[in-house]
Image: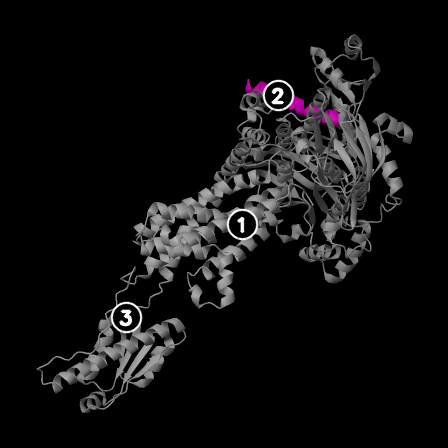
Amino acid sequence: MGSLRRLWAVARKETREILRDPVTLGIAIILPVLMMFLVAYAITLDVREIRLAVLDEDGGPESREYVAGFLQSGYFRLQAAVRRPREIERLLDEGSARVALVIPAGFSRDLGRGLPAEVQTLLDGSFANTAIVALNYVDAITQAYTARLHERALAALAGGSRHIAPVRVEPRVRYNPGLRSEHYVVPGLFAVILMAFPPLLTALAVVRERERGSILQIYIAPIRAWEFLGGKLLPYAAIAFLEMLLLLAAGSLWFSAPVRGSVPLLLGLSLLYVLCTVAIGLFISTRTRSQVVALLLSIVLTLMPSFLFSGFLFPIESMPRFFQWYTHLYPARHFMEIARGISLKGIGLERLWLNVILLLAYGAAVLSLAMLRFQKKLG
Amino acid sequence: MPAVIEAKGLARRFKEITAVAGVDLDVARGEICGLVGPNGAGKTTLLHLLAGLLDPTAGRATVLGHDTVRDAAALRPRLGYVSQEFTLYGTLSVEENLDFFADLHGVPAAVRARRKEELLAWSRLAPFRDRRAGRLSGGMQKKLHLCSTLVHEPDVLLLDEPTTGVDPASRRELWEILYDLAGRGLTLVVATPYMDEAERCHRVALIERGRILRCDTPDALKAGLGARSMEEAFIRVVAGGEAGRAARRSRSVAAGGARAAEDALAVRLDGLTKAFGDFVAVDHVSLSVARGEVFGFLGPNGSGKTTTIKMLCGLLAPSAGRAEVLGEDIGRRGPRLKSRIGYMSQRFSLYNDLTVGENLAFFGRGYGVPPRRLAERTGSVLEMAGLGGEERRLARELSGGVKQRLALGCAVLHEPQILFLDEPTAGVDPLARGEFWDLIGSLAEAGTTVFVTTHYLDEAEHCHRLGLIYRGRLLAVGSPQALKDGMRAGVMLELECREPFRALRLLRSEPLLARASFFGSRLHVLVEDAAEAELLIRKALTRAGLPVRRLEPIAFSLEDLFVIFIDMAEQGWRERRG
């Protein structure tokens, strides 16, 4: 009873202090939302509207049909139709075209004769990811064009009496049929942002009192370590949860990212998650001597890994084995699965229970470490 | 009577440094025990050990019968600790701070409301209960700090320099509070750098290098050492322990070129005013300072001293009025003037992570001292500051007094003609302060004008002239002697008797003797008619069984003047307000 009252006293005091520093509080709340907008717009992981330059030396109906295949696909936009090879060079150098098609004279003729025709594709490889995706598109469009040619040839052979069709792939994309990147970037950002920012603020919580000297009064007072740290944890967890609500609102209202599963479940588990991430901040705060060190340490330990080791940008499965294990040091990878699972797949606890248990264990471990480290003594 | 605090062979080492080296100390219930010693003597560490904040490396201590290591949990609820820095929450209001500490100590709600009111009334903080703690004056912050450690009614109170940086009027008030607490049976241990405060303690422990050199009543200590004041006693004991420290005092400084005086005035202020929004920090101050003069600027915390100095150094623009420094208007001055003034700010403004030599080199280059000249100047400044051969020590390793000498050295590297010093000796022990004032004296002899602010009124006696500022207004200007001679407010009686605190309260209940206050362990009473007052005092004290040991009219001390001027100003304001 007395314990809870002391914990509550610390929480109330901390809340007052936070509220009286509106600038910090404002940054703490606005920055994450701002981050969501920046990242969601900047990191469009799909490659669209690739700028295409075409040098059509052939000019026959076949070559025109082939180029039309690119433009109709929706992935390419015709930047320039040029007449001289040197212009292709220039466009690629300037970066105003990322892909260039060179259709040599005789393309239509060769195809008409049933001979293999060659097309040269030039790609700007300085953006490796874009180049690989673009190359795949080029491949696919060319194959589709070839298939159409075959179809026509076969039809001509059969004299039109029988329709012969090759095997067609009919892909159906589950969970995100439009393959819209916001739909999985947004839930991923829940995991990233809630680990990137709340610990920064929390990391200052204890070390600030140490720097000021007010920690001495806490040492002297009959309050236990867990009561003090618990009281410190609550307000920051509340702020982090408020951030989650804002992110969820921005995600669904602005980016129309769906939550197919249960919203209360998502919120409940995000509360568990922010308790974990705030605990990391608190742990840092109990181990450092100055606010500057605490801040730097939490940037290295939470802000950077939240992007790199959460599976947000780089799939964890494709990391080297060591780093796959390393990602377990951060709770973000588990919440990433939870957030994407609930939002995109609409799954619930029956599939996510392992992640939830791991989060629980993680939070408990970090908090106990922080409390063990917090000695109510100097020196 | 069993001792409330008992320390036996108490020691604490930090790696190479032994901060407390085997201390034996007993403090009885209701006693005020003073810890007096130079900076870095181990006072704070000793208090930390007694509070159970640090574990001793040897020996043991019991407080209220609890071992400070094993029974820390049982001890904590009965202990109060006031640390040297302000360690409350600046963004919380006075009342919220008190509430927080009451919550921490689990004071029941019913008791709390009453106790809070008592404390607020008793400390006279009640009118400020909604003000944020960070916006209180230094003296008020200390009182609040004290209240917040009293809210759970501890039996033992440990105070680490509770009056450092607090003006004399507030210091008197705080001490009345401490006496009151001791009278109620609290046991107090107070570390202090002020010798007049040491005289007010029941017993004083002189600490140097982690050891208690002597521990006795102030009277016995003075008698034993043949000293007239505690300050003298302290310097004898400490200087004896650290031979030659005083001998290092150097007078061989020739900084500050007293070039042919183009103008006899170094500073001329005419209606200088600085307002921050509604708050007028400096209110139409007019004064002048002659070249080569040591001018002391006195006033309580928040009275406008620092703001004035900042304007004179060109760090702040005045809102109104004129100010000339070395004959140049501070509003329209170029870099030329900057190279002729030196400034030492209130806080230690050197770089802790640089060595002594690096600090000097940095400031020298910053002020544009030519390299060849700089080498020469560095040598003489090192000698002046008593830091010869210590160029390679990190500034952070220096004690408070030595740091101040180094800071002064940095401020005079470029041989300024005028030197602004903002509370250069706050929190520095008497011996170091003495050395510092020797330096100021020799700079002045060499022709440098010194404009200095201070809280220590004994230091003010070293100044040629003084200006007393309060709430932004200049109340009086003159030499210390002229100010004392000019005081027409009445006669000052000095009184010595047992239990001065009880006597003080008795006297204050008499309307004619209401202006009584502490002065060291004695009482000073400001009266209109000395003969009549003497009769009254003797009657009142004899009735209470407190025979008068000594009672005689005395000359005003600067501290008396300070308090009287402020009283008069306060009265004037009250009357004007209605």
Q: Which residue matches tag 2?
A: B572
Is residue B319 at all visible to an observer of this figure? no
Q: Secondary structure at mark 2?
A: helix
Q: Is residue B567 magenta?
A: yes
Q: Secondary structure at mark 3?
A: loop
Q: Which residue matches tag 1?
A: A365
Q: Amino acid at mark 2?
A: Gly
The reply, left or right, for residue B228 in relation to residue B325 is right
- The magenta-colored residue range is B559-578
Residue B318 in the image, given as x and y percentages of width and height: 57, 40
Q: Amino acid at mark 3?
A: Tyr
Residue B368 in the image, given as x and y percentages of width and height: 68, 57
Host chain of mark 2: B
Q: Amino acid at mark 1?
A: Ala
Q: CA distance from mark 3 to mark 2?
A: 85 Å
Question: Furthest-left residue in view?
Answer: A161
